[in-house]
Amino acid sequence: MSIKLAAVGGLVLVGAIQAGALLAGSGREGAGQPRAAAAVARAATGPTDVAVFSGGCFWGIQLVFQHVKGVVNAESGYVGGSAETASYDRIGSGSTGHAESVRVTYDPAEVSYEQLLEVFFSVAHDPTQLNRQGPDVGTQYRSAIWYVNADQQRTAAAVIERLTRAKAYRRPIVTEVAPLEAFYLAEAYHQDYAATHPNAPYIVIHDAPKVRELARRHPALYSEARAAYVAAR
C-alpha cells in the first residue's frame, strides 16, 4: 500500500479569488477540530442530487465537503477506470485510469451545484496542478469534475471559463470535465480518514488548513458540525 507523504508543499495560494466576486458563494477546519465538532446525520429537506469531484488525496476532499451546509454525505472512491482495478493498491501505480474521487450527496434546496464548484476550486484543491496535488504525484491525483447530467457539464464549463477569464490563478486551470460512468467506493479505512486521524502529519499539514480556509472564505456555506459518513448500501 502506498503511503501519503507528510512533505511540505500544499496548495498554491489562490488569493485572486474573492468571496462572492468570481463565484456564487463562499467555505474549512483546523487540526483537531474534526474531533471537537460532533458529526451529525444530516437529513435532506427534499430530493438529493449527486456531484463527484477529484482533486488529489480523497481524505481532505471528503472532509471539506462534509463541512459544507447542505451536504448530506460524502464518500471516498475511485472514478475513471474499471471495476477490476478499483482498489487503493492497484491505482497507486497511476496506470489504471482511476482518480481518487469523492461523491457528494447534497440537498439542492440548501446548496447549489455551483456553490459546490466554488468550494472545489477555491478551497478543496489547486486546479492548476497537472496530475498531482501537493506532495502526491500521479494521474490518480488529477483534478477532475465528473458530471452526471448536461446541466452539471454546462455549469462546470461556465465556472472554469469565468475563472480563466478573470485570471484567478497564476497558471492555467487543468481540471478535466468528463461524464461520470461509474463510481467505485473506496475501502472502509479511507472513509472519514481525515476526521478520525486529525493529528496525523499529512492531515495537519495538508487537510486541516483546507477546512479553516472553508470557514474563512465561505462562512455562509461552512458548517462546524461534520456530516456523518453513511456507508453506501
Image: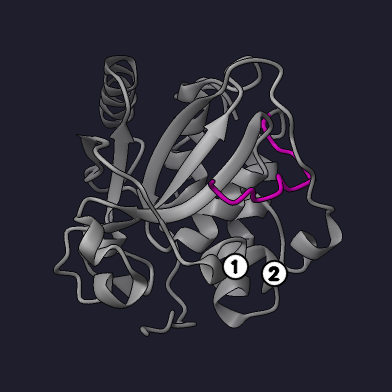
Nearer to us in this view, 212 or 180: 180
- 226 above or below 112? below
Query: Magenta span has 227?
Result: yes
The color scheme shown is one colour
Relative side of 24 to 178, left or right: right
CB contact under 8 Å: marks 2 and 1? yes
SS at mark 2 in the image: helix
Nearer to us in this view, 115 or 171: 115
Magenta region: 221-233
- 202 above or below 176? below
Q: Is residue 59 visible?
A: yes
Q: Gap between marks 2 and 1, in whole Å?
A: 5 Å
Spot the residue most to the left: 95
- Residue at the image position 29 percent from the left and 62 percent from the top: 86
Which label number is shown at residue 196?
Answer: 2
Residue 229 lies, in percent from the top left, at 65, 51
List the residue tagged with mark 1.
193
Which label number is shown at residue 23?
Answer: none
Q: Residues within 10 Å of mark 2 (few under 14, many from 20)?
A: some
- Residue at the image position 31 percent from the left and 38 percent from the top: 145
Nearer to us in this view, 63 or 107: 107
Relative side of 49 to 30, left or right: left
- Residue at the image position 78 percent from the left and 61 percent from the top: 33
